[in-house]
Amino acid sequence: MFIGFFLALRAAGVKASLREYLTLQEAMQAGLGDYDIDTFYFLARATLVKDERFIDKFDRVFAESFKGVLRQKPAGPDGVEVQELPEEWLRLMAEKILTEEEKAEIEAMGGFEKLMETLRQRLEEQKSRHQGGNKWIGTAGTSPFGANGFNPEGVRIGQNKTRNKSAVKVWDKREFRNLAGDVEIGTRNMKVALRRLRRFAREGAADLLDLPGTIGSTARNAGYLDLKMMPERHNAVKILLLLDIGGSMDEHVSLCEQLFTAAKGEFKHLVHLYFHNCPYETLYQDARMRIGDRLATADVLNKYDHTWKLIFIGDASMSPYELIQPGGSVSHWNEESGQVWLSRMLQHYQKAVWINPVPPAHWQHSQSTKIIRALFEDRMFGLTLEGLDAAMRKLMRS
Amino acid sequence: MAKFTGTASYVATEDLKVAVNAAITLERPLLIKGEPGTGKTILAQEVASALGKRLIPWHVKSTTRAQQGLYEYDAVSRLRDSQLGDARVHDIKNYIVKGKLWEAFEADVAPVLLIDEIDKADIEFPNDLLLELDRMEFFVYETRETIKATNRPIIIITSNNEKELPDAFLRRCFFHYIQFPNRETMEQIVEVHYPGIKLLLLREALNSFFDLREIPGLKKRPSTSELLDWLKLLLAEDIGPELLRERNAAKLIPPLHGALLKNEQDVHLFERLAFLHRRGQN
């Protein structure tokens, strides 16, 4: 049963296992499905999806797989399929308040109630946004219904509150869309993303005396001292954050700002420095990049040793000259090219990633992004939950 | 088998009911996630009271180990007793302290076991409980006995998403994500908690509340529990709906907003926005 659905789910990247599939069968056998498509949807979701990030994918596959099964609403006259209207249409229609004159005119059509009734009926018949014409509701027509019309009987009404609430639409609403893992990080997803950072921050390892363990094993050992050690659980991870500020980066600044202010609270050792487009021999301690805030990159490399993890956040799009040519910088004369400095930093910090707010699909169109990505040996990640997760894993592993 | 349909004090959405009933019928754990304050922990209490079962809560902390849920061997007491020549020392059973899982397994009537905030614990914690939750049995090494659940308890696990849970663990659970309630559900929830609240006040309060949630950049958006607290305060202070409606004037900040915004930065952000808004109107 539902093998096609299950396989479609897996193909769409929802990691449901055979075990969960069998659980669903078992649940169906126990009568939990209730022979009702809604209940089945909830049941299948609770059984097959184990992460809210995948619920949106699940909804789409479900809609696709069970399209034919769903109860179709009867088609209206003219064979036009009945469908729900966009909410904003109806809201706009509610705006106008009728004057006494208008009400009198409405009488011509059979009274206010009749008008509302007809309008509701036509709303249900109408298939798509309509321009002109004399029957369908739309803009600039002569039908009595709709906005900007010329018919004096024209009226805007609000949506009937008990409008046919179609339960079939539960998965079509796609309420879980902003929880999907591959969308770009918004404020909503920021917290979850940073918890990923914290998880990785707690995995630092060091040896520590395990006092309860020592007491326990000493007692077990009939009183002879038996020392137990355990790994330390504190934030041992040190992060050097380099942020690209200014120029092509400006549209991403606020996003990065959010990411890193939140990150600040999560780490004991977090140093953030700024650069413009590409890091050269100087970095800046402040986003305003004044002369007094300068730091020599060589000093930075000496101060923070190789145990620090390096995270670049930047869009990596610039003129290739800024990267490969000495003197290519847009803001000053650089003796050595950006490429040289980048590879120097990468040599020093083995654990380094580049997080790029530009969607990965666009990376191939930028020459400089390709060069930097090659320099980083593919350790460039998008600023999405999935990207961030992969980046953190890379930092922990490499 | 009794079905869970929500209680007098808890509004359960349709999808939540399906998930809970599936977990009850198939005797598998139910994993609940959702924004803080959407009633994850309360759910277990309500399921227990709805089905007339006992609730055994196990609140997990960062230092909690899986073994503590099963049992602990109190070696120190035994050592002390041996020094004092206590006769109890010969039987190791006297020093096995039962954990919450053991308690739940040996109960005569299957209880509801709540494993609260499982993500707070060490990353290996869920893995250590795999077999125990799956087969509902475990082995006590010290006494060489196997503890098996007489009646499989209803297990409800909550998580705040601080850590990823291992796949093997997830596969054994049903999963439900509590969405933030929409307006109608919210009205029902308020009605359940403060029956007969003035309709006008409720409408204005909900307006303010949903507006507040929409402000971009809030660190902690207020959720259901904050709303309920705030309403309680509004009722206690006898603040009328007209005061809430004055949002366009100098009083853009709703009264007693301390109940809704828990973060200093959020309050600052909000005040700044209110100031800008006010300036824009003059």
Image (cartoon, rainbow, N blue to C red):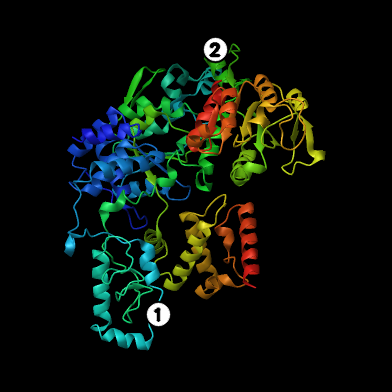
Q: Quadrant of residue B94?
A: top left
Q: Quadrant of residue A42?
A: top left
Left or right of A316: which side holds B51? Answer: left
Tell me the SS state at disc 2. loop
Left or right of B98: which side holds B80? Answer: right
Mark 1 Cα shell of 10 Å, populated few (<14), some (14-19), many (≥20): few
Tell me the SS state at disc 1. loop
Q: For the residues tagged 2 and 1, is the chain the same? A: yes
Q: Amino acid at mark 1?
A: Ile
Q: Which quadrant is home to the C terminus of chain A? A: top right
Front-most of A116 and A44?
Answer: A116
Q: Which mark is residue A97?
A: 1
Callout 1: residue from which chain?
Answer: A
Q: Position of residue B192 (x, y in %)?
A: 38, 61
Q: Which quadrant is home to the N terminus of chain A? A: top left
Q: Position of residue A206 (x, y in %)?
A: 62, 20
Left or right of B154: which side holds A224? Answer: right
Is A342 drawn above or below residue B118 in the view shown?
A: above
- Find disc 2 in the rendering and name its residue: A222
Front-most of A32 and A393?
Answer: A393
